[in-house]
Image (cartoon, helix red, strand yellow):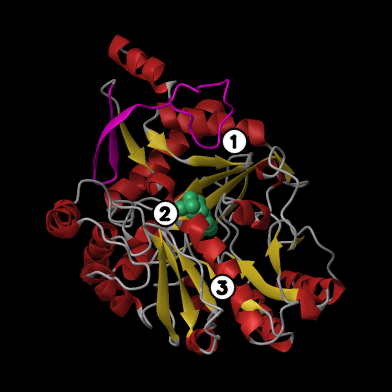
């Protein structure tokens, strides 16, 4: 490490970083430039970003068109309030573009600055809806173990990863967790003859009955669980979950903060199973990380119900940066790029190449499972393939060795995640596999 980089790291200690132990500064990579899928470090190293930042830089780094969209909009009008009585052109145009874009019948958008705020907005909107429907006791949310929904207080306790709760309790009331539909290691009970998808859907129904259907407002789920270890649900799960939600009048909130905008090979991931949510949360890839933007979309039925509210029942919810003009202009340009370059198709084609490549590493004794959907993949590391005993220590070792080989992945418990920019090319996909394989070779 160069003296200059050491100096940057020393100065960096003035920052409190997200999601780390305050005492271990963890020698961060100091990144000064991004180009395509590559990150350039201050010490001269070049790293392939196998995670597209935090699953979001889908168009890759250094896109002039996006920089220009931001510049032009900032020069024209960086910001105006979107609170009642004012609006701006980019937010109008983006909401118009998004109407029906993800799912038919989801035509209304509320903008936030990111995914946690989007989920918070989803929960509040679900409560607002049920109050308007004359069912104010429906306020609870059912989520899954292993889910990650963000870090606002409500998103924290919707999240099903205990380490995010430990230092922030007491818990926000009204969140219950059920097992995730994990085909490799399902944690719930399976009745004879049941598939994992059926068992996990039954867990939803049982939770609704246990909590009382008249108290449950919504079920929230990531179509592909990201931070929880890249869990791809079995095909029967979401159609069953949709039916159960309908049966008990529970809104389905799809948290597509990772899966939205092409990542899984469809523009939005519940399309894989031909169902649609009542509320959709999105963020990250809408701007490919070039600006902070997220939001929710709601069904026409929810919109109409909200419109029926009395004068005293305004939607008293909103952020200074809801509908931020510059961020929306970047979002519009980014969607234009994603459509022009057909990101869902790229994610399918390059995702297959990546998954095939990663599967070729299954011969290593510690590779327990390799899975993926589109361009999001997970490699689960175990100490014993028969018992499937998780091996987070080995996962960290491989992660570090890969980083030393110039590949950035992300250790999530005992799973290494891969979610590179969708702009990646075939050679770069092969490079991910080669560098990971070399890292495993050095260890195994
Ligand atoms: C599925 C999911 N939902 C919500 C969030 C939170 O989004 P943000 O960090 O933009 O608040 C994330 C972030 O990784 C996520 O993966």
Circle 3 residue: 125
Q: Kindly tell me whether residue 415 is visible in this rendering.
A: yes
- Crowding around mark 1 (Cα neighbors within 10 Å: few <14, some 14 to 19, many 20+) is many
Q: Which residues are magenta?
A: 15-42
Q: Is residue 22 left or right of residue 342?
A: right
Circle 2 residue: 354
Q: Residue at x 34, y 13 (%)?
A: 7
The one of 311 and 323 positioned closer to us in this rendering: 311
- Crowding around mark 3 (Cα neighbors within 10 Å: few <14, some 14 to 19, many 20+) is many
Query: Could you tell me how far apart the alpha carbons at marks 2 and 3 are, in whole angstroms?
Result: 38 Å
Tell me which label, 2 or 3, sits earlier in the chain. Answer: 3
Label 1, secondary structure: give it: helix
Q: Which mark is residue 359?
A: none
The image quarter in which residue 95 lies: bottom left
Where residue 106 appears, x then y in whole percent? Answer: 45, 82
Label 2, secondary structure: give it: helix
């Amino acid at each position: 490490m160069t003296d200059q980089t050491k100096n940057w790291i020393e100065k960096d200690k003035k920052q409190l970083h997200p999601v780390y132990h305050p005492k271990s500064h963890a020698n961060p990579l100091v990144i000064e430039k991004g180009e395509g899928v590559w990150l350039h470090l201050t010490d001269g190293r070049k790293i392939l970003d196998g995670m597209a930042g935090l699953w979001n830089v889908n168009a890759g780094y250094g896109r002039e068109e996006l920089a220009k969209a931001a510049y032009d909009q900032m020069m024209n009008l960086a910001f105006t309030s979107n609170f009642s009585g004012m609006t701006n052109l980019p937010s109008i145009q983006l909401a118009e573009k998004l109407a029906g874009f993800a799912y038919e019948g989801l035509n209304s958008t509320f903008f936030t600055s990111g995914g946690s705020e989007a989920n918070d907005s989803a929960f509040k909107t679900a409560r607002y809806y049920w109050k308007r429907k004359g069912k104010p006791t429906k306020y609870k949310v059912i989520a899954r173990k292993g889910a990650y929904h963000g870090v606002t207080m409500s998103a924290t306790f919707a999240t099903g990863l205990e380490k995010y709760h430990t230092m922030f309790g007491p818990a926000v009331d009204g969140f219950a967790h059920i097992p995730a539909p994990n085909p490799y290691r399902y944690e719930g009970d399976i009745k004879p003859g049941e598939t994992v998808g059926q068992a996990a859907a039954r867990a939803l129904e049982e939770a609704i009955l246990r909590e009382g259907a008249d108290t449950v407002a919504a079920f929230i789920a990531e179509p592909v669980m990201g931070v929880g270890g890249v869990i791809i649900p079995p095909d029967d799960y979401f159609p069953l979950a949709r039916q159960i939600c309908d049966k008990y009048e529970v809104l389905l909130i799809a948290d597509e903060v990772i899966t939205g905008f092409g990542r899984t090979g469809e523009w939005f991931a519940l399309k894989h199973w031909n169902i649609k949510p009542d509320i959709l949360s999105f963020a990250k890839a809408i701007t490919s990380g070039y600006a902070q933007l997220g939001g929710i979309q709601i069904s026409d039925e929810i919109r109409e119900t909200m419109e029926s509210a009395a004068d005293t029942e305004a939607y008293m919810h909103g952020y200074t940066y809801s509908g931020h003009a510059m961020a929306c202009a970047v979002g519009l340009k980014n969607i234009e790029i994603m459509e022009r370059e057909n990101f869902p198709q790229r994610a399918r084609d390059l995702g297959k190449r990546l998954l095939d490549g990663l599967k070729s590493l299954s011969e290593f004794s510690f590779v327990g499972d390799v899975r993926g959907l589109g361009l999001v993949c997970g490699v689960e590391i175990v100490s014993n393939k028969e018992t499937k005993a998780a091996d987070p220590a080995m996962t960290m070792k491989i992660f570090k060795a890969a980083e030393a080989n110039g590949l950035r992945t992300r250790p999530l418990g005992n799973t290494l995640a891969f979610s590179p920019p969708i702009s990646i090319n075939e050679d770069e996909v092969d490079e991910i596999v080669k560098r990971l394989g070399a890292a495993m070779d050095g260890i195994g």
